Image: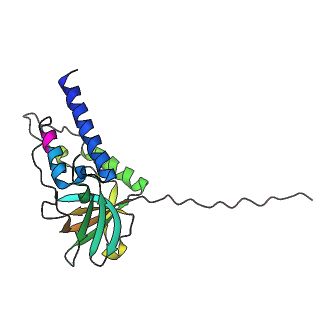
Amino acid sequence: MDTLSSKTIIIILILISFGFGYFIGSDIATDKTWQKAKERLDEYITWPEEMEITSISGEVQQIQGNKISLKISPLEPLADPSLDYRVVEVDEDTEFYRLLEKNEEQYQKEIEEFDQRTEGEMIGPEGEVTEAAEIAPPDSYTQEEISLADIEVGQRINVRTEENIKEVKQFKAVSVTVQVVLIEPIEESVTPAEETTEE
């Protein structure tokens, strides 16, 4: 059995043991045991360098006053399960936005204009980046300003902060953006032609 396979098996066994203990309410779910499991994994895995987390996305669970309860996906395999739920504080300085899907015809037109503007070479003769390469492609959505009152339970939002919130349960938001809202195409109703009968 190669080293990679051995590491994989060990990781799986640790995760299964933790999950089983957590759901039956045994002592393995305590902070102390949790930390031991992470230390054990550290012996077999080289984790990436610590990165700051200043934005997260998740589903709105509840809105009470100026606080939004958010359910997120774990930021790492052995993240504390209690951090799957965050509390987002907002105030008069928080910016609120909603992303809306662009009309297909409008978006295709913008793509064609982008293609025309970037027909030239992306890299110059001396390896420099050309003006064509610096043109950003069009987004498939537009952004509009909204308020806290426009946010609803069940919507997915992105929250941006000014602090590292990787292991912070409650924090203040700089901006809250409701993720892309798909615009259903409007179907034109067709009234069947009245049948005529010959006399």
In the rendered image, the vertical position of residue 124 relative to residue 152, given as above or below:
above
Q: What kind of colouring is applied to the model shown? A: rainbow
- Residue at image position (21%, 73%) is 94
- Helix, strand or loop: magenta stretch: helix
Q: Is residue 25 left or right of residue 3?
A: right
On-image quarter of the N terminus = top left
In the rendered image, the vertical position of residue 165 relative to residue 27, given as above or below:
below
Between residue 177 and residue 127, name the one nearer to us. 177
The number of discs equals: 0
Q: Residue 63 appears at what percent x and percent y?
A: 33, 73
Locate residue 66: give its quadrant. bottom left
- Residue at image position (12%, 50%) is 51
Locate residue 81: give its quadrant. bottom left
On-image quarter of the C terminus = bottom right
Q: For residue 19, say whether it is visible.
A: yes
Q: Which residues are magenta?
A: 39-44
Toward the right, the furthest residue is: 199
- Residue at image position (26%, 49%) is 137
Between residue 193 and residue 189, name the one nearer to us. 189
Q: Is residue 195 left or right of residue 35?
A: right
Q: Is residue 76 magenta?
A: no
Toward the left, the furthest residue is: 126
Between residue 161 and residue 180, name the one nearer to us. 161
- Residue at image position (32%, 68%) is 144
Q: Residue 69 appears at what percent x and percent y?
A: 30, 67
Q: Residue 142 appears at what percent x and percent y?
A: 33, 61
Locate residue 175: give its quadrant. bottom left
Q: Residue 30 appears at what percent x and percent y?
A: 21, 54
Q: Is residue 75 left or right of residue 129?
A: right
